Image (cartoon, grey):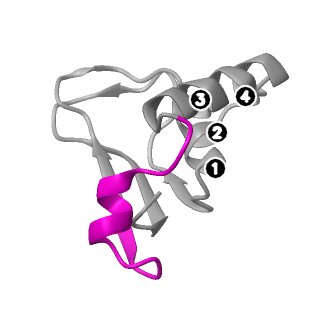
Amino acid sequence: MSDIKVTASTLELIKLAIAEDLDGGQDITSVATVDSGDLSTAHFVARKSGVIAGLHIAQATLEFVGISSIELLVSDGDHVQAGTEIIRAHGSTRA
């Protein structure tokens, strides 16, 4: 990953976006259908060819929701083709 640091104001925006998405609480569907101990692996894949940007924001967001196993498989500025795996994250399915 690059040396870009996530600022306090960026972390606050992430916090606000997640709070808005969850309406200040937990995801009701996840709580009702997913066991609290379930683990999953998420694969972030490019839908189209392009240039990667914002990995530090993606990583900060994943960390904010409690995901600690995050693999950045490319770097900001990399040119990727559609179908390229960009990030692999492992953690709570509810996250």
Q: Which residue is drawn at 54% across and 57% down?
A: 70
Numbered-mark total: 4
Distance between the Cα atoms at labels 2 and 4?
A: 7 Å
User: Which residue matches tag 2?
Assistant: 60
Amino acid type indicated by mark 4: Leu
Marks 4 & 1, CB-CB < 8 Å contact = no
Q: Which of marks 2 and 4 is nearer the N terminus?
A: 4
**Depth check: 51 or 40 in front?**
40
- Other residues around mark 2 within 10 Å, as few (<14) / some (14–19) / many (≥20): some
- Other residues around mark 3 within 10 Å, as few (<14) / some (14–19) / many (≥20): some
Q: Does the magenta stretch include residue 28?
A: yes
User: Which residue matches tag 4?
Assistant: 11
Marks 2 & 4, CB-CB < 8 Å contact = yes
Q: Where is residue 86 in the image (x, y as percent from the top left)?
A: 37, 42
**Depth check: 74 or 92 in front?**
92
Distance between the Cα atoms at labels 2 and 3?
A: 5 Å
Q: Quadrant of residue 29?
A: bottom left
Amino acid type indicated by mark 1: Glu
Q: Residue at x 20, y 22 (%)?
A: 49
Distance between the Cα atoms at labels 4 and 1?
A: 10 Å
Mark closer to the observer (2, 4): 4
> From the viewer's perspective, is residue 10 above or below residue 18?
above
Marks 2 & 3, CB-CB < 8 Å contact = yes
> From the viewer's perspective, is residue 41 above or below residue 43?
below
Q: In which quarter of the image is residue 69?
A: bottom right
Q: Where is residue 92 in the image (x, y as percent from the top left)?
A: 47, 68
User: Which residue matches tag 3?
Assistant: 57
Q: Position of residue 59 (x, y in %)?
A: 58, 41
- Other residues around mark 1 within 10 Å, as few (<14) / some (14–19) / many (≥20): some
User: Which residue matches tag 1?
Assistant: 63
> Which stretch did the figure color magenta?
24-41
